[in-house]
Image (cartoon, rainbow, N blue to C red):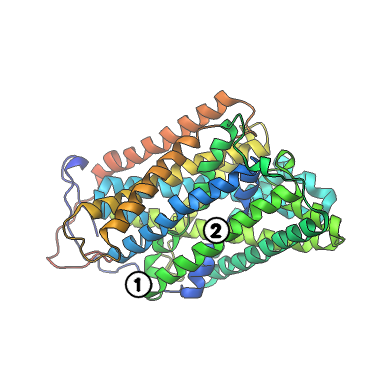
């Protein structure tokens, strides 16, 4: 579909055209693939150390977020995917409910956050994979040149796999999910073994709110960020087998498994390492190394590092492949260069959008490596920026539920008015709180004013760039004649 602009973008009118050749995406994802995709996308072990480093109080934050953000998110994803099936996810939903600009802004933030988040996944991959070389090489993770080279190599590999297509790329996602399950099982299993044999120094006092809670506040935004991911499959709505039947069950199972794994992994790190000694990049490997040595199974460290590295690669692949569908759809709508909507002639994947995303991520990796005081601080700053941009689309997602609830006729929805009001209100307020608290510096930050300058500066930059593409670039969209009434669109919309 081409949404044509006449005069100012504020006076946008929509027409529907039927292109000679429509982009065709392969429906490669079944129920099992979706459950595994949700687990590998939602349960990200890389955010657990930065959260657990703030102590046992974060367990209560996990529970609050699961009830007030994650559960409403599941309701919203099922409701919106039912009402608006098709490629685009948060972009399509905000566009249909609130209009073109809001749809573009939602999709833009969802995409650009991943250009910041994917580099953090690369950094985490480096921090973990060096343990596969032996414990004596763990210090390589703090070497900027080595960390950057390894990050860029993984970025190139994931880009190629996603261009080849979900039929191939999904196996990295699935293997990553399996690696995540096994890594979490080993981590939590070792934690239970150590606790049963040696006890723990963790007490009830560790779960109380600290006297100075400012460093803990940042964790709430990161926790909400960690629980994002249920909407990812809907971004690839045209690539799911029978999405109306497949999606609800996959959302439920993926959510239950991810929530349980998050709480278990956080508790294990607190038992094994202690909040004051957790490294935000190597916290998981720290815990496994410590516990494995204590129970006499130190041989497990290297295979565990390999398994966890595979899991991290799967996380990067899932988010890179899913978020690249946003500029793909925006390219089809002509709010961004139309060539972003190109589909590979052989693999039927949005290769142009994937390449652009990889190039921008590469640039951000290089800039942040050489503009930051250290690898851990770089990780924490990019993670906080990604939190803010990632949560913006969810303001639209939850506001959409409230919009539906206001109507006298609920239409063809899956949930009643009360459920829509509850999920929309809780989700919107929790999301807004998470965005605000992300601007509070974590304890790894050495310069507060530099951190705040980066946070506000980059956030405003990305929002301003979104406005530029919509209000300035959008004016140059090529007007095309209306072919006829009742035609269908490339996005599958009426």
Q: Is residue 491 visible?
A: no
Residue 473: give x, y in percent of width and height.
30, 42
Name the side, left or right, on which 171 lies relative to 140. left
Q: Residues within 10 Å of mark 2 (few under 14, many from 20)?
A: many
Residue 293: give x, y in percent of width and height.
85, 56
At 72% from the left and 55% from the top, the residue drawn is 129
Q: Quadrant of residue 168?
A: bottom right
Residue identified by numbered label 2 = 259
Nearer to me, 190 or 297: 190
Nearer to me, 379 or 49: 49
Q: Quick one: label 2 or label 1, which is nearer the N terminus?
A: 1
At 12% from the left and 65% from the top, the residue drawn is 484
Name the side, left or right, on which 415 lies relative to 349. left
Image quarter hosting the N terminus:
bottom left
Nearer to me, 380 or 164: 380
Q: How many numbered discs?
A: 2
At 23% from the left and 56% from the top, the residue drawn is 2
Q: Between marks 2 and 1, how big is the CA–CA gap?
A: 24 Å
Image quarter hosting the C terminus:
bottom left
Which mark is on residue 73?
Answer: none
Nearer to me, 200 or 357: 200
Position above or below: 303 against 223: below
């Amino acid at each position: 579909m081409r949404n044509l602009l006449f005069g100012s973008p504020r006076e946008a009118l929509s027409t529907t055209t039927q292109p000679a050749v429509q982009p065709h995406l392969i429906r490669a994802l079944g129920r099992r693939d979706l459950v595994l995709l949700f687990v590998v996308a939602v349960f990200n072990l890389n955010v657990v150390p930065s959260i657990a480093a703030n102590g046992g109080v974060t367990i209560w934050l996990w529970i609050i977020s699961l009830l007030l953000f994650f559960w409403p998110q599941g309701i919203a994803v099922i409701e919106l995917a039912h009402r608006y099936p098709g490629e685009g996810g948060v972009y399509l939903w905000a566009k249909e409910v609130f209009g073109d600009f809001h749809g573009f802004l939602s999709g833009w933030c969802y995409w650009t956050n991943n250009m910041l988040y994917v580099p953090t996944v690369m950094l985490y991959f480096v921090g973990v994979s060096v343990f596969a070389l032996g414990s004596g090489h763990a210090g390589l993770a703090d070497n900027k040149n080595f960390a950057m080279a390894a990050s860029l190599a993984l970025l190139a590999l994931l880009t190629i796999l996603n261009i080849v297509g979900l039929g191939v790329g999904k196996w990295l996602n699935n293997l990553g999910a399996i690696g995540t399950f096994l890594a979490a099982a080993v981590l939590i299993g070792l934690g239970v073994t150590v606790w049963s044999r040696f006890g723990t120094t963790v007490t009830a006092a560790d779960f109380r709110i600290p006297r100075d809670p400012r460093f803990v506040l940042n964790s709430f935004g990161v926790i909400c960020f960690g629980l994002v991911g249920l909407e990812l499959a809907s971004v690839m709505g045209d690539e799911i087998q029978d999405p109306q039947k497949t999606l609800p069950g996959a959302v439920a199972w993926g959510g239950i498994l991810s929530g349980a794994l998050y709480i278990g992994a956080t508790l294990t790190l607190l038992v094994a390492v202690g909040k004051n000694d957790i490294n935000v990049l190597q916290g998981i490997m720290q815990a496994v190394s410590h516990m494995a040595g204590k129970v006499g199974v130190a041989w497990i460290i290297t295979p565990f590092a390999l398994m966890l590295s595979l899991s991290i690669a799967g996380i990067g692949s899932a988010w890179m492949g899913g978020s690249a569908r946003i500029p793909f759809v925006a390219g089809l709508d002509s709010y961004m260069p139309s060539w972003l909507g190109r589909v590979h002639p052989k693999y039927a994947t949005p290769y142009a959008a994937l390449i652009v995303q990889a190039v921008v991520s590469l640039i951000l990796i290089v800039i942040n490596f050489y503009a930051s005081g250290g690898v851990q601080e770089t990780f924490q700053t990019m993670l906080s920026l990604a939190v803010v941009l990632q949560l913006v689309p969810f303001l639209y997602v939850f506001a959409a539920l409230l919009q539906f609830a206001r109507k006298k006729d609920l239409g063809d929805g899956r949930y009643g008015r009360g459920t829509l009001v509850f999920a929309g209100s809780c989700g919107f307020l929790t999301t807004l709180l998470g965005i605000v608290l992300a601007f509070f510096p974590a304890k790894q930050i050495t310069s507060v004013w530099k951190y705040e300058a980066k946070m506000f500066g980059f956030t405003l930059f990305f929002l301003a760039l979104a406005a530029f593409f919509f209000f300035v670039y959008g004016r140059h969209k090529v007007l095309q004649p209306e072919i006829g009434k009742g035609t269908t669109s490339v996005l599958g919309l009426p």
